[in-house]
Amino acid sequence: MHVMPAEQEKLLPATPKLLRAGFFALCVFLCWAVSGCRTHLEDSTLALDAATAPVIDQAADAYRSANALHNQRQDYDAVAEFDAPDQVYNPRNIQVLLSDKDIAARLAVLRGFQVYVKSLCAIASGTNPKELGPASVSLGGQLTTLVNTLVPSIEKAAGLAKDNAASGGVISAETQKGITIGLDALGQFLIARKVKAELPAKIAAMDPHVQALAALLESDIDVLKEVGHRDYERIINLQTLSLRKNNNQASQERRKEIMKLPDIVRQEREAEEKLASLRAAVVVLAQTHQQLAAEAQGKNTESFKEKLQDLASAANNLGTLYSSL
Amino acid sequence: MSVPELPAAPGPITIPLSTEVRKAYQDLYDTIEAAIETTKDAAVLESLNARQADVDNILTKDDMYRLHANTALFDALSKQINDTNEGLATLEKQISSIAAGFNEAGQVVAAINKVLSLVPGI
């Protein structure tokens, strides 16, 4: 192939500058667009993670506490029923409020939900995985070496040899840095595009299950609150009855037994506050997931979808730029 | 002191209780509780506690029914959540493979560089 040396001399200085400027502008745009969408999705996902933690911690505690309280109430029942004249007390008839299987079913769902939230966090932060940076640096460096090796050989073969060594090679260190940034942005874009294509649908499909989970947890909490209230009432009433019936008890012993009454009430209030707090946490969890689903589907003004649409335009620009090279 | 007049217990019961029947039992429980909280007489207290225990037993059975019904729903939810988790795990792998792809590309270019350095004059 014959190349006009004069034309080549005219084009060479101008073209790289133009490409470099365009490439740099695109890199900046891609970085901005990718980081913009990542911030929204990551923020919403981290909010969901923060809303999940108290529910997981408190729910397991609430189930175990409810069982322990119900057992304690049955111990008080045993004392009252043992000496009752009209019945024979049989300890084998005790009830279990929540069996191990009942608690295991609830904890399995909560653990499954925790895995779901952790996976979302990993994917949202995975739009910029830690492996991508070093891979981009390595690829950028290797491309630079390749071009710096190959271009002088081609120029030599075409009779265009010039002293590139004096200017630091065909690709300068500054341009190499630009390539690396561009590759990193491209990687982030490809990942963000993958996330945009699949994640919103998964989050939207999960939302009804999360709302159902929240409704179930609220229903459980309501039941536990009612049972817990009656368990405490029963304990207080039986303790009071015991004191009224045995008023010839030794003074010191009687004082101790009487002082248990306000302590039981304090325990009841504390347990009710914990359940109220858990219920509020469940409501926040359901709302946070709903917001995340809306965010992922682009229902909010500054939406995840809009940011990714920006990225799709950027992809077209990137394709145009690459095809012009 | 005699046992105060209390409303009659609602008719025959079926668990789960209907909303109306449950409310009737809850009202009866509250009425007995109010009477318990205003008496010091041990005999009256004993009688009220026994009646309240019967009502409490019915309400607790209904509560346990509701908890067990929820267990079945939790079991069903568990499967659906696990299915979603499997889909997310696949997506995570696909995302990792994009970053790995850049690494592989770097290795390919490095291999080309090596060939070029070993074949002088290209």
Image: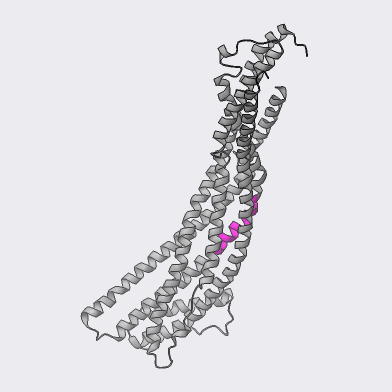
Where does residue A168 sit, x and y in percent of width and height? 56, 16
Does A65 appear above or below A167? below
Rendering colour mode: one colour
Foreground: A301 or A54?
A: A54
Q: Quadrant of the N terminus of chain A?
A: top right
| Helix, strand or loop for the magenta stretch, by majority | helix
Task: Decide if residue B72 is on the left or right side of residue A280.
Answer: right
Picture quadrant where residue B12 is located: bottom right
Where does residue A260 sit, x and y in percent of width and height? 30, 74
The reply to whether residue A28 is visible in this rendering is: no
Where does residue A184 sit, x and y in percent of width and height? 58, 32
Foreground: A261 or B36?
A: A261
Does B112 appear above or below A19? below
Q: Is residue A303 magenta?
A: no
Task: Decide if residue B40 is on the left or right side of residue A302.
Answer: left
Going 51% across and 69% down the picture, which residue do you hit? Answer: A223
Foreground: A39 or B62?
A: A39
Which span of residues is magenta-colored? A202-218
Task: Decide if residue A220 is on the left or right side of residue B5.
Answer: right
Where does residue B50 sit, x and y in percent of width and height? 42, 85
Q: Quadrant of the C terminus of chain A?
A: top right
Going 55% across and 20% down the picture, which residue do you hit? Answer: A174
The reply to whether residue A6 is visible in this rendering is: yes
